[in-house]
Amino acid sequence: DAKTTQPTSMDCAEGRAANLPCNHSTISGNEYVYWYRQIHSQGPQYIIHGLKNNETNEMASLIITEDRKSSTLILPHATLRDTAVYYCIVRVGSKSGANNLFFGTGTRLTVIP
Amino acid sequence: NAGVTQTPKFRVLKTGQSMTLLCAQDMNHEYMYWYRQDPGMGLRLIHYSVGEGTTAKGEVPDGYNVSRLKKQNFLLGLESAAPSQTSVYFCASSAVLAGGKTDTQYFGPGTRLTVL
């Protein structure tokens, strides 16, 4: 699995967009980019994932660069409840065997009132 | 649906004691996983299962055993607990999509274990 690099921490003003970057320069062609978050030691929560194209769901948008070496998770209107640790994970969508996720230390996002 | 549940929520053990953590999911997922999370760290995979009756080692399997006798349950056992196993343990499950690809993982609330 490709290794990911994320900033240790970020702040964002409430109501503004939060843009969380992730570098995955060694990503291979069949590896997906996943984002999870963990709020105050709760179980991690799935946010979004993508392969090549940008993706959007009710929680966030995922922008993947054309060379796929980096991506950005966008929370369009951050709220205080979005304060959490955000994990960027790159993983092959395995056809056999489990889709094991390898978590790093993530980015601690603090939304400021 | 309750999703993924874990029992117990908290536990304190003495060194050398044994215990079993229970994970249950009601989503009919094929795959189940056990992770541990130490303070300030990300999650590390202990063991996983790709179906009833099957288990496999993850990143940090030493000192743990698992069993998947029923599809909905995944048990994590500590035969002789050590202080190094003090951690928060998370269980997760995922479905198998059409074409054999696995879906995203859904996590339980965690079990906080302290070994004295």
Image (tube, rainbow, N blue to C red):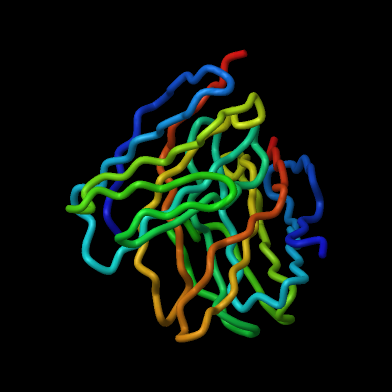
Asked whether A17 or A50 is in front, the reply is: A17
- Judge from the rendering whether residue B64 lies leftward or rightward of residue B62; answer left or right: right
The image quarter containing residue B1 is bottom right
Q: Position of residue B37 (x, y in %)?
A: 56, 43
Q: How many marks?
A: 0
Q: Quadrant for the C terminus of chain B, please.
A: top right
| In the image, farthest residue toward the top | A113
Q: Position of residue B55 (x, y in %)?
A: 55, 76
- Judge from the rendering whether residue B8 lies leftward or rightward of residue A110; answer left or right: right
Asked whether A76 or B113 is in front, the reply is: A76
- Judge from the rendering whether residue B84 lies leftward or rightward of residue A33; answer left or right: right
Q: Is residue B13 positioned above or below A84 on the image?
A: below
> Which residue is found at the position 65% from the left and 84% from the top?
B52
Q: Position of residue B25 (x, y in %)?
A: 74, 68
Asked whether B50 or B57 is in front, the reply is: B50
> Which residue is found at the position 59% from the left and 45% from the top?
B85
> Which residue is found at the position 39% from the left and 70% from the top?
A93
Q: Is residue A92 positioned above or below B19 on the image?
A: below
Q: Is residue A3 positioned above or below A111 on the image?
A: below
> Which residue is found at the position 51% from the left and 35% from the top?
A76
Q: Position of residue A88 (x, y in %)?
A: 40, 45
